[in-house]
């Protein structure tokens, strides 16, 4: 069954979501990374990119914020492009940990079987896999080029964030070396950790994230640039990773309430994927106790429910 919604209806709903949640004051900027604590807490942007390449924006959708954990999805895509679906499953895994994003306990519990590239441990392992192994500068170029292709324009490193995070990432240092202990890191641990920290410090806009989501939703073809970024067969793999663990230990609650596979970052960004329909992104710095932006969650949930975007619905959405 097909359900058709109009472009005007989508625009109206995005605008409503923006107005409805703009003044919400719940949550608090992430403060374990000093740079993030000082970002203007009132920033709020929403962006949708349809698979026909049209974008719809509200608020601060052009503001560059720290991509943080949303970058895990993009690097997982790079690893899938370089190695294929099978090897990602063998070397890292595709399972939920059911634990917070930076959990050391998860590694200890799962040392005999893999986890997922979308928590810190798996993301550092993914950076270790990026080719060419051992070559930091070339690996970094591959990471940034991949982000640029997925988003249709280049990200920009936020130097201050990179410095701030590098000076305070003691937990992640432990993770990188614990992975070494279990033979689950495939390049030098310090090099891999540095790449992970740098990729988390990339500045990105909600509009760029919506385009990235739309590229995934559109079978790997960026709907804005027209470039086939990755093989179509990888799209369901990526969306399944995001659906499984995009909100860490609260992924089930998120899917139940929004019906949209989405990935969060402590910088306040969320990127959602509605296969065959759109990428949807929102950004607002204050986060809840689990590291997920309060306003971005509310906005995406509202838009999803108003427009019936739930991927578990029995009908296909067409926006005309
Ligand atoms: O490794 C960290 O702690 C940060 N660079 C990223 C964490 C993050 O975004 C978790 N997501 N909500």
Image (spheres, grey):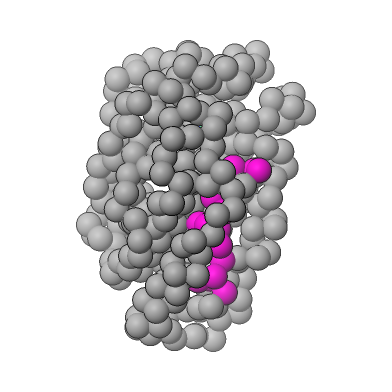
Q: Quadrant of residue 220?
A: bottom left
Residue at 64% over, 43% down: 290
Give yes or no for residue 91 being in the magenta stretch: no
For the magenta stretch, what is the residue range? Answer: 289-305
In this view, the residue in front, 161 or 256, is 161
The percent coordinates of residue 252 (x first, y second) are 70, 56
The percent coordinates of residue 44 (x first, y second) are 42, 55
The percent coordinates of residue 144 (x first, y second) are 31, 35
Residue at 53% over, 47% down: 286
Quadrant containing the N terminus in the rendered view: bottom right
Above-or-below relation of 46 to 179: below
Q: Quadrant of residue 314?
A: bottom right
Give yes or no for residue 295 being in the magenta stretch: yes
Asked whether, in this view, residue 231 is left or right of residue 223, the answer is right
Above-or-below relation of 255 to 121: below
Asked whether, in this view, residue 32 is left or right of residue 206, the answer is right
In this view, the residue in front, 164 or 190, is 164
Asked whether, in this view, residue 213 is left or right of residue 226, the answer is right
Assign the magenta stretch its main secondary structure.
helix
Above-or-below relation of 316 to 127: below
Visible residue check, residue 83: no
Quadrant containing the C terminus in the rendered view: bottom left
In this view, the residue in front, 78 or 119, is 119
Residue at the extreme right of the image, as rendered: 109
Above-or-below relation of 260 to 165: below
Residue at 62% over, 71% down: 312
């Amino acid at each position: 069954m097909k359900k058709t919604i109009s472009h005007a209806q989508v625009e109206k709903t995005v605008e409503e979501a923006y107005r409805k949640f703009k003044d919400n004051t719940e949550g608090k900027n992430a403060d374990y990374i000093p740079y993030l604590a000082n970002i203007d807490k009132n920033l709020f942007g929403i962006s949708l990119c349809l698979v026909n390449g049209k974008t719809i924006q509200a608020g601060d959708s052009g503001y560059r914020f720290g991509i943080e954990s949303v970058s895990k999805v993009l690097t997982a895509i790079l690893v899938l492009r370089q190695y294929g679906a099978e090897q990602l499953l063998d070397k890292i895994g595709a399972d939920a940990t059911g634990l917070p994003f930076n959990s050391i306990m998860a590694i200890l519990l799962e040392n005999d079987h893999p986890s997922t590239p979308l928590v810190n441990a798996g993301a550092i392992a993914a950076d270790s896999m990026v080719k060419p192994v051992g070559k930091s500068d070339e690996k970094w170029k591959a990471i940034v080029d991949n982000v640029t292709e997925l988003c249709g324009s280049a990200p920009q490193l936020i130097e201050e964030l990179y410095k701030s995070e590098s000076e305070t990432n003691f937990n992640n240092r432990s993770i990188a070396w614990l992975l070494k202990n279990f033979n689950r890191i495939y390049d030098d641990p310090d090099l891999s950790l540095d790449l992970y920290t740098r990729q988390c410090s990339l500045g990105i806009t909600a509009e760029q994230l919506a385009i990235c989501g739309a590229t995934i939703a559109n079978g790997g073809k960026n709907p804005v640039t027209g470039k086939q970024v990755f093989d179509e067969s990888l799209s369901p793999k990526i969306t399944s990773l995001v659906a499984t663990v995009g909100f860490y230990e609260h992924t089930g609650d998120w899917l139940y309430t929004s019906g949209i596979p989405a990935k969060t970052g402590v910088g306040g960004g969320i990127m959602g994927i509605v296969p065959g329909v759109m990428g949807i992104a929102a950004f607002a710095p204050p986060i809840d106790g689990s590291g997920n932006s309060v306003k971005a969650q509310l906005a995406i949930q509202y838009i999803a429910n108003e427009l019936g975007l739930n991927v578990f619905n029995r009908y296909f959405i067409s926006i005309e």
